[in-house]
Amino acid sequence: MSKIVRTISADASVVATAIDATEIVSRIEQIHKTSAVVTAALGRLSIAASLIGNGLKGDDESVTLRLNGDGQTGVLIAVADSNGNVKSYVSNPVVEIPLNQYGKLDVAGAVGKNGTLSVVKDLGLKEPYTGQVPIVSGEIAEDIASYFALSEQIPTVCGLGVLVNPDLTVKAAGGYLIQLLPFADEKCIDILEDNINKLPSVTEMLTSGLSEKDIAIKVLEGLAPEVLDETEAAYKCDCSKKRVERALISLGREELTAMAEEEEKIEVCCHFCNKKYAFTNEEILKLKNR
Ligand code: ZN
C-alpha cells in the first residue's frame, strides 16, 4: 500500500498532496516489464493520476491521463479512482535510449516533446470533463502543472520522481501537487516559491527518509500547514469477465463471428494487469447475439 497525505495552509489558501508511490511503481515495473526509462515515464504519469484522483470528491469519480507524444514509448495511459488507486498502460514498455545531459533517465526523450496531454475526469455526469494541452516538456510534472494552469486555471506546482535500481526494480517513487486557491495572497505565493526553490527532488527526499507526510508538510513550510487527510492507495485494476464481455460486444457481430470461426478457445488479456480471460467459441457466439 502507498499512502497519500493532504495538507492545507493555516489560511486555507493552499493545499498540498504527497505520495510515496514506491509500491505502486514497483507493481508497474512487474506487470509491464518496463525498461528503466519507461518505468520512470509511466511511473510519473501514474503518480500524477493518483494525486489528481485523490482530489476528486465522489466515490465513483475517476481521472484518466493520456500522454501522447512523438517518442518511442507511444501512448501512456494512467487511470485513477477518487482514492488514488491507479492502473496504467504503455504502448511500448521497452525503450532503450541514452541518459540525458544531466545523467538522468531521459523521460522527455522517450515520451517525445511534441504531442498532447489529455485529462478526462469522469465526475458521474452525462459527459466527462475533458481538457487537453500540448506537451511542454515531456518530463511530465511540468506538463501536469501546465494542464492545471491552462485548462482549469488553478496555479499548480507538481513534482514527480522515480528512481530505478540497476537491476530495474524501483528504489523510490513519489510525488507532490501544490494547488493555490483564488484567494491566496502575494506573501503566501512568495513563501511557496522560496520553498520550491529550496526543495530537493522527490526521490532525494524519499531516499533521505522523508515520508509522504513529511513532504506534504515541508512544501508548505512557513504557512503553518495542517494534515487534512490520509488515504491508502495501490496499483489496482478493476477488470472483470463482464467488462471484457462488454469490450468484445463492442467489436461488432462480424468480428465476433470471425473470431469464433478461427479459434476454439479465445483468450483476452487485460492491458492494465495482464489478467487473462478465456472464452470458448460458443461463449463468443452468444455474445454476438447480445
Ligand atoms: Zn485488469
Image (spheres, rainbow, N blue to C red):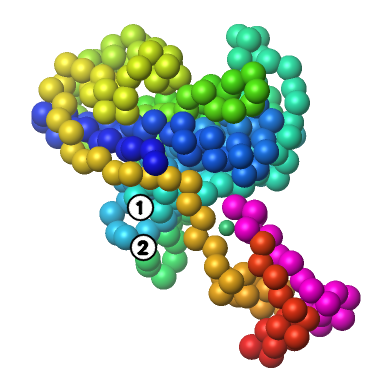
Q: Is residue 91 magenta?
A: no
Q: Is residue 225 visible?
A: yes
User: Residue at point 26% right, 19% down?
Assistant: 218
1 or 2: tag closer to the N-terminus: 2
Helix, strand or loop status at disc 2 = loop
The picture quadrant for ligand 1 comes to bottom right
Residue 33 vs residue 256, the one in the foreground = 33
Outermost residue, bottom side? 289
| Mark 2 closeness class: few <14, some 14–19, many ≥20 residues within 10 Å | few
Residue 233, horizontal then vertical, whole percent? 38, 45
User: Residue at point 75% right, 26% down?
Assistant: 96
Give the magenta part as a residue range.
Answer: 253-275
What is the number of the mark on residue 82?
A: 1
Which amino acid type is marked by label 2? Asp
Q: Quadrant of the C terminus?
A: bottom right
Q: Is residue 118 visible?
A: no
Up-down relation of residue 243 to residue 147 (above or below): below
> Which residue does the numbered mark 2 point to in the structure image?
60
User: Residue at point 68% right, 25% down?
Assistant: 109
| Mark 1 closeness class: few <14, some 14–19, many ≥20 residues within 10 Å | many
**Quarter of the rendering containing residue 58:** bottom left
User: Residue at point 13% right, 22% down?
Assistant: 224
Residue 68, horizontal then vertical, whole percent? 64, 42
Which amino acid type is marked by label 1? Ser
Do the numbered discs 1 and 2 sit on residues whose CB atoms are within 8 Å?
A: yes
Residue 265, horizontal then vertical, whole percent? 79, 74
Up-down relation of residue 110 to residue 191 (above or below): below
Residue 96 falls left or right of residue 174: right
Residue 174 falls left or right of residue 271: left
